[in-house]
Amino acid sequence: MKKKRSLIFLLVVLILLLAAYFGLQTWNSSREKKAEEEEKAATVHVTDIDPDTITAMSFDVGNGEMIFEKEDDTWYYAPDKDFPLAQSYPEDMAETLGAVTADRELTDGDALADYGLEDPSYTVEVTEEDGTVTDIYFGNTTGDYYYVTVNDEGSVYTVSTTVIDNLNHSLDDMAQLDDYPSIGSGNLVKEVITQNGETTTYDSEDEDQAEDVAAVAGGLGAVSLSEAADYSVEEKDLAGFGLDEDSRITVEATYTQDDEEKVLTLYIGAEDGDGNRYVMINDSRIVYLISTEICDNILNS
């Protein structure tokens, strides 16, 4: 009987401890939720726009005028819709501009001119899908903040300079360049070069060509698509790069990747006068610059 009473006592203690634990958890959760609600209520919203509803943004924050438009959930650089725009940039910008918050709102402040807002340093225009346009004006800086006003409301806020930092990208920064495969002596199967109507083939199965195959594989493996001369070249402009069908050298490299044979087509054009040659790959419309030395290795010349 005594043993039974001890077990009952221990069970009651366990139940009380569990109740206290869950009660404490609930209390802590309630406190955290209340703190979040208080923080949210204290946040000064300069803009409060659902980024998914933003369909256009335009601004010039030091890298020239940037105009982006969204169609069918895809963002484009408006002056050149063929520009290979990496979607993460305008998406991040829309997130930033849709939720601009202020460190504080100035009350009984000076005239707009005193904050540099009569002639703003930067003007950002945001358009929503219903046609609503929001203009955000950035004036003088004060420490790590800009003086900001929206539309013609007259209210002046101090906003972190990171808002402008998040917009401050050049077109080169935002270009989505082509992926280039990993090619080397270990996976190059064959390279076929067509130049002036003549074809040269380097085949990894030909033991007599082992040295040549290693040389061209080294060239192919050294390619880095990091510098572009034109992001969306038009057919009529190809000749200026020596990349029209009559002028270019065509290189078809067959290689293995994940036990599957694939083909890379590389077009090599004229020299740029600075130690590079103009190059295009596959069906891309981007003209790249690759060193003449690497091109010579690819061509085994």
Image: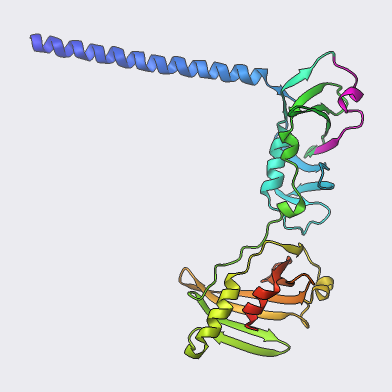
Classify the position of the N terminus by image quarter. Answer: top left
| Picture quadrant of residue 11 | top left
Residue sitting at x 88%, y 32%: 120
Q: Is residue 54 above or below residue 296?
A: above
Q: Is residue 84 above or below residue 156?
A: below
Instruction: Tell me, yes or no, if residue 163 can be seen here.
Output: yes
Residue sitting at x 72%, y 67%: 288
| Picture quadrant of residue 18 | top left
Q: Nearer the viewer, residue 179 or 184?
A: 184
| Picture quadrant of residue 191 | bottom right
Q: Position of residue 124 (x, y in %)?
A: 82, 37
Q: How many marks?
A: 0
Classify the position of the C terminus by image quarter. Answer: bottom right
Q: Is residue 27 above or below residue 70?
A: above
Is 225 included in the stretch rendered in magenta?
Answer: no
Residue farthest toward the left in the current orientation of the protein: 1
Boundaries of the magenta span: 109-126
Left or right of 261, for residue 122: right
Residue sitting at x 65%, y 89%: 199
Q: Nearer the viewer, residue 52 or 124?
A: 124
Is 116 included in the stretch rendered in magenta?
Answer: yes
Q: Nearer the viewer, residue 15 or 256?
A: 256
